[in-house]
Amino acid sequence: MDEPINLSGDEVDVSDDEIGDEMEEEVGSAPPISNQNMHKPNLSGNPVKRKRKLTSRVWKAFEILKESDSKGNMLCKCKKCGTTYIAKSSHGTGNLLRHKRACDLIYKSYKDVGQLLIQSNLKGSLGTRSPTFKADEFRELVVVAIATHNLPFQFVEYEGIRKCFAYLYPEVKTFCRNTIKKEIFNTYSIEKSKLCDLLQLVPGRIALTSDCWTSVTTDGHISLTAHFVDHNWCLQKRILAFTSMPPPHNCASLAERVCGLLKQWRIDKKIVSITLDNASANDSMGNALKFDLNLMFDGDYFHVRCCAHILNLIVQDGIRELDGAIIKVRDIVKYYKGSQARKKSILRYVQYVGFESTRGLRQDVPTRWNSTYHMLDSALYHKKTILHLAKTDANYVHCPSFEEWSRIEKICNFLQVFYDVSLAFSGSKYPTSNIYFPNVLKIRLLLQEEKENGDTSIKNMAKNMHLKFDKYWSVSATTKKNESSSHSGVANDKSDTYMTDFDDFFSCEFTTGGKSELQSYLEEPKLPRTGSMHPDIEALCKHTLTMKIGDVNEDESDVPSTPSIQTQHSGLG
């Protein structure tokens, strides 16, 4: 009898004793076949051989495959590990039985997890997991998982996690939290070096945003983020630092810390601007940093105040005295959120009228005007539901009147303009410096229009906001001349003098012998957007588009004070 062929490439050692035992087992277990069933005529009258039943116990661990090998031999596959063998009757089952014993020994204490790790190859057929276990790659994956999901270092010491690792690979070598901490710091050093090299290759200058944070333990932290335009004209964002900031948080300490971080990243000569909130210490810090950095335009455009933060202060001042209708809406939300039964009654009616059930009533936070806007917006969406429940619920007495609903809608539309502009200013995936003046002008014109509103509540709100707006606009220009011309330009409803400075510059006659690149650019016809005929103008555009007018994210644009760190992050230090 020929030697069995193992398609997996492993050597098979067949002893005479084992072959004898297996042949005896196969012969002894085969059922007798009667002569009358041996040959059964088909439609043509020719006898057809009946397939013999597989009776060996080894076939409980193997399955016959439909496909054959290149020579037409029938194949079978181990149900546990997926190893493939030839299944010809002339080859016997000795090698299959020995493979079954080996598999049973390996999987004696562990169930098969091969199905969880099976992956498809390029041909679409199924291939088993890699037979080799690489400890370095496993440790790297654990490091990435901990950093990505904000897991504690003690995660690798959890008994359940270690059992899970051992279940996947019995011989896995676990490690302690000190080891994983060391690996994370090593990975951080490698990635920091890569980012540092990337920043050196930035074609233009780099804009910064910074903010101070407070943990639940009142420890101070400072964040520093870099924004730049890459070679493909895509705005990029990289977090440079989120580190502890011990007191005092004065001008000198903040400036020293930021300057030290910039030198550490070797970008202190490539800065174009820094965007900060409206704190007095930040104003002084911006002035102090001008002397240590190589800035453009003598640092006139270096310190940018966060426009989203200023808008937040303007709106907070306007809605300080809430309208009675807003108070009623707040009472509505509190009333129906205070009982599970009332929540279910709202949900039943919402489903009955066909509204979107996932959009419920939202309760506001008094210190966040943005949440007040969301509360009013959700109440207007569920207006029919609220009116219906007010008729059916005898205990509810806070429903606004139709006149109050009309005023709520006006207030919500009024606040929506500020909300949309705040979101636009707080974006980090697109330039924001080019949308500053159009949006500020939109708000100014809105405030001037609403100051003449017939509704007393909206009129008083607009007046308070207008006073606050003028206060911040008066300090937004870099020089007194720019301040005067810019202020008069915005104050005009038709914005006739909005481009006064540009028109004055364009009408000037230059008497110098040679023209600057900017003059040549203004005199030439419009070029394709992908053109690169003026590298200096291109660099100036990159510097301008890099500057950020907001230092907070979209979901944080309504934060009224120093942002706080979550509890689980406070213990990382």
Image (tube, rainbow, N blue to C red):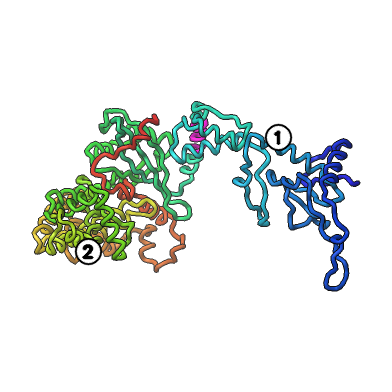
x then y, percent, for residue 174: 56, 29
x then y, percent, for residue 360: 29, 55
> Which numbered marker is on residue 384?
2
**Three-letter residue code for mark 2:** Lys
Task: Examine the rendered structure and indicate whether residue 561 appears above or below residue 390.
Answer: above
Count residues near mark 2 (Cα–Cα under 10 Å), then give few for <14, some for 14-19, many for 20+.
Answer: some
Q: Label 2, label 1: how many angstroms apart (C-alpha)?
A: 68 Å
- The quadrant in which residue 99 appears is top right
**Residue located 72% across and 45% down the image:** 61
Q: Does the magenta stretch include residue 443?
A: no
**Three-letter residue code for mark 1:** Leu
Give the residues in magenta. 183-193
Count residues near mark 1 (Cα–Cα under 10 Å), then give few for <14, some for 14-19, many for 20+.
Answer: few
Magenta-drawn stretch, dominant element (helix, strand or loop):
helix
Q: In this view, does 350 lie to the left or right of 70?
A: left
Q: Is residue 109 left or right of residue 37?
A: left
| Front one among 264 and 21 | 21
**Residue located 61% across and 42% down the image:** 113
Q: In this view, does 89 lie to the left or right of 470?
A: right
Task: Examine the rendered structure and indicate whether residue 91 appears above or below residue 515.
Answer: above
x then y, percent, for residue 381: 25, 61
Label 1: state its secondary structure.
Answer: helix
Q: Nearer the viewer's eye, disc 2 or disc 1?
A: 1
